[in-house]
Amino acid sequence: MNRKLQQSMRIPCGFTLIEVLVVIGIIALLTGLLMPGIGMVRKSTAATKSQSNLKQWGTGTIMWSNVNNDRLPWEGLKDANDMPLNLAQKAYWANAIPPMVGQLPYSKISDDAYNAQTNVPFAGSSDSIFIDPGATTEDSGPWGSGQPGSGGLQRQFYFNYVPNSQLNNTLLERSGQAQYSPKLAMKLSSIARADATILMLEMRSNRRELPGSDVHFGRDLKRHRADWKRFAARHFDGGHMLFADGHVAWVLNSEATRNSQGSRDPNFAGGDWNTNKLVWDPMGPATDE
């Protein structure tokens, strides 16, 4: 075999610098193309799971109503410091609904955590129907109320899904009730526009879900019920709502926070946040408290 033939039959023993750079460039390009897609898949998965959680709340709400004279569960006293009083009531929504779908009442969850001096489930820490997998906490943990236990932890609560706080406003006003009462709540059959009336909604878990210039950016999020002022924006600039007919839908935050006059201004004179698509108070106007 002559020398030229031997040279032509030699197998290259490595890559040239140019070839390595080309491969690195291709990998970087593919990574750049794939990463946004992976992020979008994760966001879509979290949104789907959150919607599924809210559907469970809908199933449980309707089941509870069916065995309680058509009444909806009690939304509870507004102040977070009243949480011990709320949790003492079986009709309180966080106690009443979960057992209907095989979950623990929140009083049990709260008691167990307090006795063990551990945190209740909160965003990023648990697979629970109380927790939205797409939520991120603004603080280091859940919210506390009352006296601390032996380990320094208060009795805690943390919710990403909450009742519509406007639902019973006119009902209570007409009844002369000064406080929210567990014995007086809306009946499902009395809601005329069940397909548009909001029972529960995703609440913001973090102020940064909204831009700093938004009119609702600075709202206190330590709540166990809410309306449009604290509605979520973490799922593609919006969130999910449970309606009185049992269906769940995604709603854009800027649409949910706009009144029937077309304004998002909380100080809009005579503003009614009941609209053709979204009803917050089925018995009267929904106004900014």
Image (tube, grey):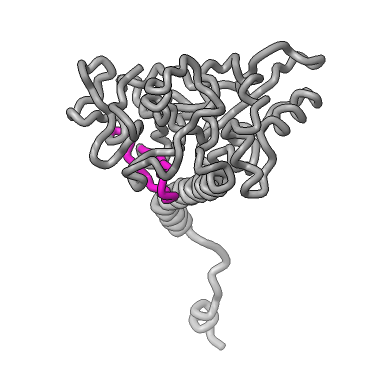
Please check the rendered image and state whether residue 243 is part of the magenta-colored stretch, yes or no: yes
Q: How far from the left and from the top, in percent, is residue 87? A: 65, 26
Q: Residue at x 41, y 49 (%)?
A: 245
Q: Residue at x 37, y 41 (%)?
A: 191
> Does residue 23 sit above or below 262 in this rendering?
below
Q: Work out whether residue 42 can be spotted.
A: no
Where's the C terminus, which quadrant? Answer: top left
Residue farthest along the top direction in this orientation = 147
Task: Write the start and end of the magenta stretch as one range.
Answer: 238-254
Q: Residue at x 74, y 27 (%)?
A: 111
Q: Work out whether residue 245 can be spotted.
A: yes
Q: How far from the left and from the top, in percent, is residue 129? A: 59, 42
Residue farthest along the bottom direction in this orientation = 1
> Does residue 58 sit above or below 92 in this rendering?
below
Q: How far from the left and from the top, in percent, is residue 226? A: 44, 27
Magenta stretch: helix, strand or loop mostly:
strand
Q: Residue at x 30, y 28 (%)?
A: 284
